[in-house]
Structure formats: structure tokens, C-alpha cells
Amino acid sequence: MTLIRPPSEMTDAGGRRRRPGTGRAVAVLVLALLALAIPLFGPSAALHGTGEAAAPGAGGVALLRAVLFAALCVPLGELFVGRLARSVPGAPLDDLAVPRSWAPYATAAGFVAALGLASVVATGNLVPHSLSGIDVGGLYASRDGQVALLEVNAFLVAALCARSGRPALQVWPLSAVVAAEALRAHPAAEHSALVGSGLTVVHLTCAALWVGGLLHVLRTLRRWGPAEPGAALLGLYARVAAVLLAAVSATGVWSSLRRMPPDTILEQLTDTAYGRTLLAKVLLVAVVAALALWARTRLRRAPDPLTACAPARVEVVALGLVVVVSGLLTALPLPIRW
């Protein structure tokens, strides 16, 4: 009689025991280390040879902003995909078929990141070395401080909503975070700051729905299994994602041209830290677009539409790197308008 080994006793080619999830755990660890290394070591690499000076603690600020952006993507993506799933005929929407929400953890992480960024603003954009050096009352006296406090309070309210019986209410405090980020990125003294803030609102909202939406779609399909509603949900998301990609690209290009005029953009893409990081982000988005096209082709032409999940998983990893690079981009000195 042939005995079937349990998964925990599977062996590799050398006869050594291995666990089925080891490869995935190693991959997650490598990606986590990469996501940590980009904001921490990215500023010095991007600034090398440019003659520009980074703000104190640029690496830590980049890491906090990356966490804040990720914390925005997860709950917005869950709300977005939850709405899409309810429009899919025959979709299983019981508690066992819906993946456990990550919004409470994401919004709590966003609150901690926003608190850290507020402490930097409270010390005059310096790294605080002690609690006594943080002027909390001074936050109310400046525009940057008020924006930082708005983000802290908005994430706190979103975390409470995520744990309440009406998690859909998160959309309001999360919208406040988007508005606060738009105001922070475009000070009142900036030329046509209102236009810049509007572009950032659209860019950040569409990006959050795209990244967080794809993550939650993949988590949902793991619960639904190879059923027809899964393919329908993935197809519905793909159609909306195409519009989101177009909006992200258009607003990103417009925002870049506002900060780097067309006659200097090629030079600044290679000679400034902001331009180099922006170029890296553009290349990553191009990779993401290619993966999205591959997944859409499989979804439409493959005998099993759910084979599109394979490139979609790689796409969500690449999108995670885009979020991290975006955090780095906000911590670097802005390009010079020549």
C-alpha cells in the first residue's frame, strides 16, 4: 500500500524536509526588506552627485510616508472592491466567503505614521530626539502643523470606523487624509496651488483604489475559488482599473510638467534626486501597465480566465514598490524651476 506523505513531510531533491509555505515566506521576507531599504537608503542614493542636500531624517520621513500611503490604499481598496462584489451576479457574500478586513490594522498603522510625521513638523522639520523637543502646541500655529494634525485625527477616526458596525464610514476620514496630503504637497505660496492640489487629489485617490483594489480582489478570489463569479469580479475590476491607470498617468504627467518644465525635464530626470526617483517610479508604473495588459489578455482569451491571477499577483507586488518609491519621492527636495 502506498502511503501519501502529509504536506509537512514533503522533501526536496536532496531528501531534506521542506514545508510547502517556505518559498512564499522567504519571498515575503525579501520583499519586506526591499520595501524597508528603499526609503531608508534611497535618499542618499538619489542625491549622490547632484549637489543637493537632503532634509534631516529624510529616510525616516520617506518610510513614514510610504506607510501612510499604504494605510490609505488598503481600506479604500476594500470599500471599492466590496462595492464591485455586490454587483456581481451570484457572488458569495456571506462571512465565510469575504476575506477578513485588514482595514483596522492599516488605519492603525496610518495613525502611527501620521503621528510620527506630525512630531517631525512639531520640531521644525527636524528629527525629534526627545519628547521635550516636540512643540505640540506649535502645530496649531502653522499650516503644515494643522495639516499634520488633520491626518492624525482622520486616521484615528478611520480606525474607529473600521472596528465599528459601519466600516463604510471610513470613506469620510480617509477622504480627509487625501485632501490633507494634497494641501501638504502644494503650499499656498506655490504658483496655482489649487490646481496642483486638485491634481494630487485625483492622482492619490485613483492610485489608492487601484493598488488597494487589486490586493483585495486577489484576497477575495482566494476565498471564492475557481467559480464563475471570481472571473466576473476580476473582469469588472480590470475595466475600472484601466480608467484608474489612465487617470493616474495623466495627473502624474501633468504634475511633473508643473514642477519640471518641458525644456528642462530631461536634464532634471538625471541630474536631480527628485527627477531620478520620478524616473524610477515611471519605469515601475510601465512594468505594472505591462503586467496589467498581460493579465487582461489572459482574462479575455485563456480557457480559464482565473489564470490572470498569476500576473496580477506580480502586479500587486510591483504596485507595492510604486507606493514605497512614492513615499521616497515626497521626502526629497523639489526640483528647481529653471
Image: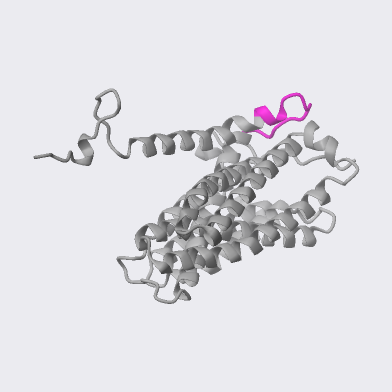
| Quadrant (top left, top right, bottom left, bottom right) of the C terminus | top right
| Rendered residue at 46%/74% (across/down) | 88
Magenta residues (range): 44-57
State the predominant SS element of the stretch in magenta.
loop
Q: Is residue 307 left or right of residue 197?
A: left
| Rendered residue at 60%/40% (across/down) | 62
Q: Is residue 21 left or right of residue 80?
A: left
The answer to whether any part of residue 135 appears in the image is no
- Residue 222 lies, in percent from the top left, at 38, 57
Q: Is residue 189 above or below residue 93?
A: above
Colouring convention used in this rendered image of the protein: one colour
Where residue 94 sits, quadrant-wise, is bottom left
Between 168 and 301, the residue placed more toward the observer is 301
| Rendered residue at 77%/30% (across/down) | 52
| Quadrant (top left, top right, bottom left, bottom right) of the N terminus | top left
Between 50 and 29, the residue placed more toward the observer is 29
Number of marks in picture: 0
Between 293 and 108, the residue placed more toward the observer is 293
Q: Is residue 245 above or below residue 171?
A: above
Where residue 268 sits, quadrant-wise, is top right
- Residue 190 lies, in percent from the top left, at 81, 53
Where residue 122 sits, quadrant-wise, is top right
| Rendered residue at 43%/36% (across/down) | 27
Q: Is residue 49 above or below residue 190?
A: above
- Residue 296 lies, in percent from the top left, at 57, 58
- Residue 289 lies, in percent from the top left, at 64, 51
The answer to whether any part of residue 160 appears in the image is yes
The answer to whether residue 227 is magenta is: no
